[in-house]
Amino acid sequence: MQTQTDLSPFFEGILASRANSKSIDWLKSQTEKINSDASPTKFFLAFSQASRFFKKDQLNLTETEINQASGFVTGFNPLHWDVLQTARTYLLLKFGPGKEAWLKAVNLLFETGDLHEQQALYSALPLMPYPEEMLSRAIEGCRTNMTLVFDAIALTNPYPKERFPEANWNQMVLKSIFMQRPIYRISGLDERRNQALAEIASDFAHERWAAGRPVMPELWRLVVPFLNDKLLEDLKKVVFSEDQLESEAGVLAAYQSDFAPAKDLLKSFPETVSAIEYGEISWEKIGKDFQEKRA
């Protein structure tokens, strides 16, 4: 884990090219106040007032900046961050009392912050100086039904992959599917697939089918390493779906599986298999197409 000091110049550079000089001067003055005052009062005030000086415009990071970010913390990628949450993260990293005082202040901020303040906090989980002490907070945060906050934890955030126990991980992924969030953005999704999650995904699909509702096509990514005779019956239903994305997802799952009987399904879909082999069909492409279809 990198230290706070390591990350500060990176965020300073990001903000300097995306905010005006007045905002940057304000941020510097607040940082000085936070560093000179051991109490959390000035930190709380600056964290809240940052919205007056920084906008919610997307960062639109360059490829170089994305690579720099992952060099600090494995899997860290602020691709979907906005300028305001970046400024708030910078303030958070500059707030450096002792461990007990830091945890008390930050936990209070989690409990009292508005939606955008919570978004900044949950997104910054992998950058915090005491990430292990924030596990219960992160797990609790996944219970929210507020998309902005849930996405900050579940999507493009390496913290759950590194810290969540299997049961909590599975709950987060299932809730992402229930809320129809783009699960291709869940960090470490393939690495943390497990038998229990595959069975949960299948049960969820059956519940949706029984209710006459469609199933999010990305769900079938979860069963790939665990295909068996039972799950194959699900996949047979999926590949012959009239919905193109669902059918493509089923074929892709069969294509990526090592379960020999699943390979027989591919014979009926030579064009789809060819598209997969040429990179025209992927889980990310299916996920993006599904989200565009919902919009």
Image (cartoon, rainbow, N blue to C red):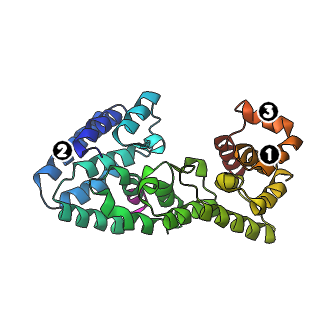
Find numbered disc 1 in the image and state the secondary structure of the residue it sits on: helix
Rendered residue at 75%/47% (across/down): 254
Q: Position of residue 288 (x, y in %)?
A: 65, 44
Determine the image quadrant of residue 65: top left
Q: Which residues are magenta?
A: 113-118
- SS under mark 2: helix
Residue 140 pos. (x, y %): 43, 69
Amino acid type indicated by mark 3: Ser
- The answer to whether residue 53 of the structure is visible from this angle is no
Residues tagged 2 and 3 counted as in contact (Cβ below 8 A): no
Magenta portion: prevailing SS class: helix
* Nearest-to-viewer mark from 1 and 2: 1
Choose top left, top right, bottom left or bottom right for residue 227: bottom right
Give the alpha-carbon distance from disc 3 to disc 1, as whole Å: 14 Å
Q: Which residue is mark 1?
A: 263
Q: Would you identify the image quadrant in which residue 86 lies?
A: top left
What is the crowding at mark 3: few (fewer than 14 residues within 10 Å), some, or many (at least 20)? few
Name the kind of residue labelled 2 in the image.
Ser
Residue 35 horizontal/vertical position (percent): 14, 50
Q: Residues within 10 Å of mark 1 (few under 14, many from 20)?
A: some
Check contact, mark 1 vs mark 2: CB within 8 A: no
Q: Nearer the viewer, mark 2 or mark 3?
A: 3
Residue 29: mark:
2
Q: Residue at x 75, y 60 (%)?
A: 231
Q: Is residue 268 visible?
A: yes
Q: Residue at label 3?
A: 274
Seen from the viewer's position, the closer of residues 99 and 233 is 233
